[in-house]
Image (spheres, rainbow, N blue to C red):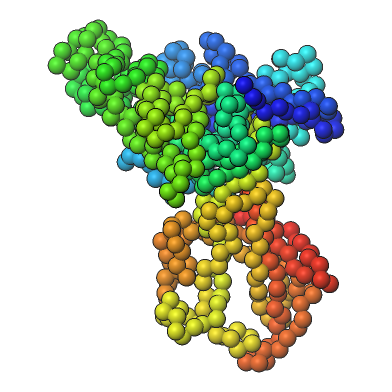
């Protein structure tokens, strides 16, 4: 089968790349040492502390003591002796903490109360603690696997690039928190934050699928396919068109989708079921429920393949309670009850896969499934049946899908295969516009008299990047802006421009309600761009207001947004002597 053929590294010397896929339930890490003239080779971290057998995945779990100190991480948290010590020492078990980072606009599929964070720690800090653990294991792996490993690490780690994966709808605010966590963990220095890069789990997964060779027959120029990453916390779905095969170039064909409907929600439904079923028995304690749930995750959940299947959960006892379906310490779960645990997640997946029929057209007839939930026999069979009904082929690449994203993240960095993405929302900023007495939307809004006598209203919506736009990786979206600077206010140093997103179907004319400062539904401020316009001010002509006689300058400049990568970047520019001059700009997140 065809695979993506990787070319030798053309850079000078050596460079270390580390990719870390921190999932809701499991995580993985891979690395690559780029060597001049050699084809890049990706390697997984296969040795984690306390693992019985080498495995690419490790639980995204941390135990903390009462003082907030890290006591156990990853596979250590599944060790029986460690669990007993945790119970005796009243350690706090932090799990599913990644979901506390989620954007506010992503709702949970159930009225789910997430496990709490450790007292006194934010999700960012837990993230940093976990990344610190991963960094130590990457270091340990490299220094003990390579003959000159200690020298390699000492030489390359200070300048290494770190690629972190994110669900589809994680945005700049979440990326900013993750970058700060990587700095706190010592993966990069405080002044080297730009060496932390972000790739969506869907992009990384589709590149892994290509590398695996299992979808080679589907790689047809101008063909279309859908990647469905069914992870622990999120379901990420993206459509791609194949622009070229040599080199491989993929383009997003429609806006990606993300649902908080992953495998943990199946587990949560089972937990509620167990609590109700075992109430009043010797297994009603939180500790007993957690042990039963652990067994459910390891066995029943993974083996279930349909409503005709009877599942069993080990309660760690010997008693039989016939009317509850408990036989010698094992709880019987009928197949129809198991189906209900999976149903909301499957509904979300099928809803997301309707991306194949966007705007009434069939955009793709092939679906690639990856992620832990996709390895469920029941989920896979249901989606294959759905595909057969819809005329869509469904494939699940061979190999451990839990490491797919970590390896695919390295492929994303090395190959730069995905050149076009589709904007999910409208992006823009509020501006002043001339007052129109005949415009109903402009009425009941405060007016401003500009220095030239123009009457304006503020907070009008000005789109910089329209929704569903195809965005090339290097393309900037540019909008002109004008700022009045009165001479009495002194020289301008930094100008701040707020960037908003509109998440609904059709944006109103104004960002705020009339006469109020509150945002209309659908609008959300996502960041601020701050740039130095002092040089632009010096080139602006001094004017005198016809209204007040005050001296002022009109600063004319452009705000340039680039969203073709997986991370927003911005800068400001203005004209000098007929040429564009660019000023530095920084992005600040609230």
Establish if 267 lies above or below 192.
above
In the foreground, 429 or 68: 429
Q: Is residue 288 left or right of residue 79?
A: left
Establish if 466 lies above or below 400.
below
Outermost residue to the left = 323
Task: Say which quadrant the C terminus sits in.
Answer: bottom right
Residue 539 coordinates in the image, percent (x, y): 79, 75
Residue 190 coordinates in the image, percent (x, y): 70, 42
Residue 481 appearing in the image: yes
In this rendering, the count of numbered labels is 0
Q: Is residue 315 left or right of residue 181?
A: left
Q: Is residue 377 left or right of residue 407?
A: left
Residue 219 coordinates in the image, percent (x, y): 60, 31
In the foreground, 452 or 394: 394
Establish if 161 lies above or below 311.
below
Residue drawn at 47 percent across, 70 percent down: 509
Residue drawn at 22 percent across, 23 percent down: 277
Residue 119 appearing in the image: no
Residue drawn at 70 percent across, 74 percent down: 555
Task: Say which quadrant the N terminus sits in.
Answer: top right
Establish if 326 lies above or below 135.
above
Question: Picture quarter containing residue 175?
Answer: top right
Residue drawn at 57 percent across, 32 percent down: 206
């Amino acid at each position: 089968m065809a695979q993506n053929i990787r070319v030798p590294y053309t850079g000078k010397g050596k460079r270390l790349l580390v990719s870390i896929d921190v999932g809701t339930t499991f995580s993985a890490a891979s690395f690559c040492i780029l060597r001049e003239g050699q084809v890049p080779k990706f390697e997984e971290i296969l040795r984690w502390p306390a693992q019985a057998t080498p495995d690419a995945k490790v639980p995204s779990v941390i135990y903390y003591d009462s003082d907030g100190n890290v006591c156990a991480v990853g596979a250590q948290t599944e060790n029986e002796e460690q669990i007993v010590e945790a119970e005796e020492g009243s350690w706090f078990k932090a799990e599913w903490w990644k979901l506390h980072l989620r954007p506010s606009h992503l709702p949970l599929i159930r009225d789910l109360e997430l496990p709490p964070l450790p007292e006194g720690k934010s999700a960012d800090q837990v993230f940093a603690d976990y990344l610190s653990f991963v960094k130590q294991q990457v270091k340990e792996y490299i220094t003990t696997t390579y003959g000159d490993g200690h020298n390699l690490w000492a030489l390359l780690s200070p300048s290494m690039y770190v690629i972190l994966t994110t669900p589809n709808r994680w945005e700049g605010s979440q990326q900013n928190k993750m970058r700060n966590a990587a700095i706190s963990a010592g993966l990069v220095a405080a002044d080297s934050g730009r060496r932390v890069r972000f790739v969506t789990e869907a992009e990384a997964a589709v590149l892994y699928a290509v590398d695996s060779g299992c979808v080679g027959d589907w790689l047809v120029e101008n063909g279309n396919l859908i990647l469905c990453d069914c992870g622990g916390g999120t379901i990420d779905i993206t459509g791609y068109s194949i622009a070229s095969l040599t080199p491989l170039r993929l383009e997003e064909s429609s806006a990606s989708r993300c649902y908080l409907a992953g495998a943990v929600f199946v587990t949560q439904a089972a937990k509620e079921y167990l609590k109700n079923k075992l109430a009043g028995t010797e297994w009603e304690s939180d500790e007993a429920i957690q042990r039963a749930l652990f067994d459910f995750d390891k066995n029943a959940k993974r083996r279930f393949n349909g409503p005709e299947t009877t599942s069993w959960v080990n309660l760690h006892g010997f008693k039989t309670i016939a009317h509850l379906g408990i036989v010698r310490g094992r709880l019987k779960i009928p197949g129809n009850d198991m189906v209900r645990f999976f149903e909301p997640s499957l509904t979300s997946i099928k809803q997301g896969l309707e991306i194949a029929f966007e705007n009434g057209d069939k955009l793709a007839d092939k679906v690639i499934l990856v992620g832990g939930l996709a390895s469920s026999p029941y989920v896979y069979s249901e989606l294959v049946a759905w595909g057969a009904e819809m005329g869509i082929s469904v494939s699940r690449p061979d190999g451990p899908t839990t490491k797919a994203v970590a390896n695919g993240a390295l492929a994303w960095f090395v190959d730069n295969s995905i050149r076009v993405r589709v904007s999910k929302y409208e992006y823009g900023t509020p501006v002043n516009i001339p007052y129109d007495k005949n415009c109903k939307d402009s009425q009941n809004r405060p007016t401003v008299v500009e220095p030239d006598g123009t009457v304006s209203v503020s907070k009008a919506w000005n789109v910089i990047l329209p929704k569903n736009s195809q965005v090339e990786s290097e393309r900037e979206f540019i909008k002109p802006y004008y700022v009045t600077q009165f001479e009495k206010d002194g020289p301008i140093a930094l100008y701040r421009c707020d960037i908003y997103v509109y998440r609904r179907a059709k944006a109103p004319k104004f960002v705020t309600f009339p006469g109020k400062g509150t945002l209309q539904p659908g609008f959300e401020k996502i960041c601020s761009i701050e740039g130095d316009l002092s040089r632009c001010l010096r080139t602006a002509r001094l004017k005198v207001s016809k209204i007040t006689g005050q001296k002022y300058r009109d600063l004319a400049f452009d705000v340039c947004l680039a969203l073709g990568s997986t991370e927003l970047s911005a800068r400001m520019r203005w004209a000098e002597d007929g040429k564009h001059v660019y000023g530095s700009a920084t992005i600040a997140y609230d």
